Image (cartoon, rainbow, N blue to C red):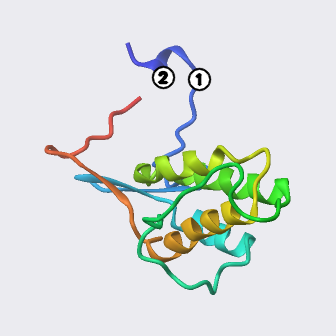
């Protein structure tokens, strides 16, 4: 039994954009990207003209609660790290670093903010990275 026979439904067609995630569907592939979301973040945090870095993590990274010199404003840091958590949807390899940065939400210091901004500088260099889901058989859109 088809669901459309049992419930009233509205056909919204193919998904193209949802909660900051762009979706491109073809017969063989589905690609998701957060390029526009990253551009908005760079603008929001004043980093549209930032210097790019090729890695999100400095190999000498050693962060703890006492790192850095001065405490930083909570709201700004929390917004940045929260946004970075959302970016891990299409960049799961950033989970460790973003998780590490999120440990300092209570009392962020300047060094914590510097590393969070480094992740944004990395994102500005790699904003065209996408996730591609390939199908071994053509994707068929079923009728509801």
* 65 vs 84, nearest the viewer: 65
30 over 44 or under it: above or below:
above
Residue 56: image x %, image y %?
47, 66
Percent x, y for residue 129?
Answer: 39, 66
- In which quadrant of the rendered image does the N terminus lie? top left
Callout 1: few (<14), some (14-19), or many (20+) C-alpha neighbours within 10 Å? few
Element at badge 2?
A: helix
Label 2 with label 1: CB-CB less than 8 Å? no
**Camera sees residue 15:** no
Q: Quadrant of the C terminus?
A: top left
User: Which sits in the foreground, 22 or 116?
Assistant: 116
- Residue at x 40% of width, y 18% of height: 2
Label placed on residue 8: 1
Residue 107 is left or right of residue 2, and the answer is: right
Q: How far apart are the two marked residues, 2 and 1, measured between alpha carbons?
A: 6 Å
Residue 130 placed where, x, y %? 38, 61
- Looking at the picture, does residue 116 appear above or below residue 3? below
Q: Can residue 136 be seen in this snapshot?
A: yes
Identify the residue at image location x=25%, y=44%.
139
> Residue 62: x, y in percent?
54, 57
User: Mark 2 highlights which residue?
Assistant: 4
- Nearer to the camera, 124 or 24: 124
Foreground residue, 111 or 142?
Answer: 111
Query: Relative to residue 80, is residue 74 drawn left or right?
Result: right
Q: Residues within 10 Å of mark 2 (few under 14, many from 20)?
A: few
Q: Quadrant of residue 26?
A: bottom left
Q: Secondary structure at mark 1?
A: loop
Query: What residue sits 51% from the left and 81% below the top?
Result: 52
Query: Number of marks in the image?
Result: 2
> What residue is at 45 percent from the left and 53 percent from the top?
90
Residue 72, label in figure? none
């Amino acid at each position: 039994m088809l669901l459309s026979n049992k419930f009233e439904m509205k056909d919204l067609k193919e998904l193209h954009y949802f909660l900051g995630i762009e979706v491109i569907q073809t017969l063989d592939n589905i690609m998701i990207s957060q390029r526009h979301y990253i551009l908005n973040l760079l603008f929001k945090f004043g980093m549209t003209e930032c210097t790019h870095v090729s890695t999100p993590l400095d190999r000498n990274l050693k962060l703890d609660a006492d790192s850095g010199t001065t405490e930083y404003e909570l709201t700004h840091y929390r917004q940045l790290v929260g946004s970075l958590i959302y970016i891990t949807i299409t960049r799961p390899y950033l989970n460790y670093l973003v998780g590490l940065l999120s440990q300092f939400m209570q009392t962020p210091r300047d060094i914590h903010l510097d590393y969070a901004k480094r992740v944004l500088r990395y994102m500005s260099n790699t904003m065209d990275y996408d996730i591609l889901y390939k199908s071994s058989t053509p994707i068929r859109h079923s009728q509801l």
